[in-house]
Image (tube, grey):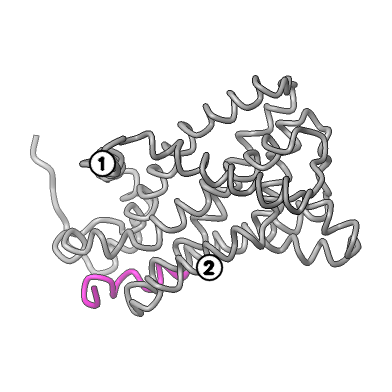
Amino acid sequence: MQQEIIIEAGRTESQYWRDLLRYRELFYFLAWRDVLVRYKQTVIGILWAVLRPLLTLLIFVFIFGRVAKLPAQGMPYPVMVFAGLLPWQLFSTSLTECSTSLITNSNLISKVYFPRLIVPASAVIVSFVDFAISFGLLVLLMIFYHVRPTWHLLGLPFFTLLALIASTGAGLWLAALNVEYRDFRYVVPFFVQLGLYVSPVGFSSSLVRDKLGETVFVLYSLNPMVGVVDGFRWAISGGATPVFVPGLIASFSVMSLLLVSGVWYFRRMERTFADVI
């Protein structure tokens, strides 16, 4: 059966979102390719997905738990740290992969038409694979420290989705900016490293709320990962670690703004990618 191809001014723009569905096989291919080559030619392979967060966990437990003696709220300190480290790893990895995805696929973008939004979206899948593998380590920690799961675990998919929304929104901004200004290749790793210590990964966010007050904490929650990390700990601790609802609303508002504005800016700059890249 022959297909009719119609070349018409503005047709591609009007059918952009329909083309996302038509090119879904390309999305699957790019995602699967990135998963296969991520740990290719490494000695321990996919075990890096476990080793990296494990080493970070040990450092945080030693510095914040043993040296600074920061309290853990509602669960053993190592479980609390890893419950914050897991969503942060998902956010930071997907943000980094998303921000460099257009540059990595420059040959494809400069030669073939397809909705460019597929490229950063497929890059997020790689980070989710790492997240799924590292989640097994969290399960082992919960078993070792006798942290019993409750119905609160049903909230984990929701907070995982929020982490992906935050990283995708910011990643779309950075991906588009990275095409025009290659300086962002050096800026992104710096902000990711800074964000690890600014976000409540190695400590409980309740320390910030107790010392600085609820008003300041809401401003602190404009960091979208504050709400995500608190949500993860709430789900894993069985509700023993409470979620500050105004802070969660603030985090969710920033995530939504990042995603909507990120898609808008990416679509605005998309038509110039093939020429500039």
| Residue beneath the point at 91% across and 63% down | 213
What kind of element bears circle 2?
Answer: helix
What kind of element bears circle 1?
Answer: loop
Disc 2 crowd rating (10 Å Cα; few below 14, some 14-19, many 20+) is few
Q: Main secondary structure of the magenta part?
A: helix
Q: Is residue 28 above or below residue 182?
A: above
User: Residue 132 at x, y = what percent?
Assistant: 48, 32
User: Which residues are drawn in magenta?
Assistant: 265-277
Report the front residue among 212 and 227: 212
Q: Is residue 179 above or below residue 50?
A: below
Asked if residue 121 lies left or right of residue 197, the reply is: left
Quarter of the image with the C terminus in it: bottom left
| Residue beneath the point at 76% across and 51% down | 248
User: Residue 51 at x, y = what percent?
Assistant: 45, 39
Q: Residue 161 is drawn in which quadrant?
A: top right
Q: Which residue is mark 2?
A: 191
Asked if marks 1 and 2 touch (Cβ < 8 Å), the reply is no
Camera-near label (1 vs 2) is: 1
Asked if residue 173 lies left or right of residue 32, the reply is: right
Tell me the kind of residue under disc 1: Thr
| Residue beneath the point at 14% across and 63% down | 111
Q: Which residue is mark 1?
A: 42
Report the front residue among 259 and 43: 43
Report the front residue among 239 and 249: 239
Label whose residue precedes the other's in the sequence (1 or 2)? 1
The image's mark for residue 117 is none
| Residue beneath the point at 26% across and 45% down | 30
User: Residue 121 at x, y = what percent?
Assistant: 39, 50
Quarter of the image with the N terminus in it: top left
Tell me the kind of residue under disc 2: Phe
Count of numbered labels shown in the rendering: 2
Report the front residue among 51 and 22: 51
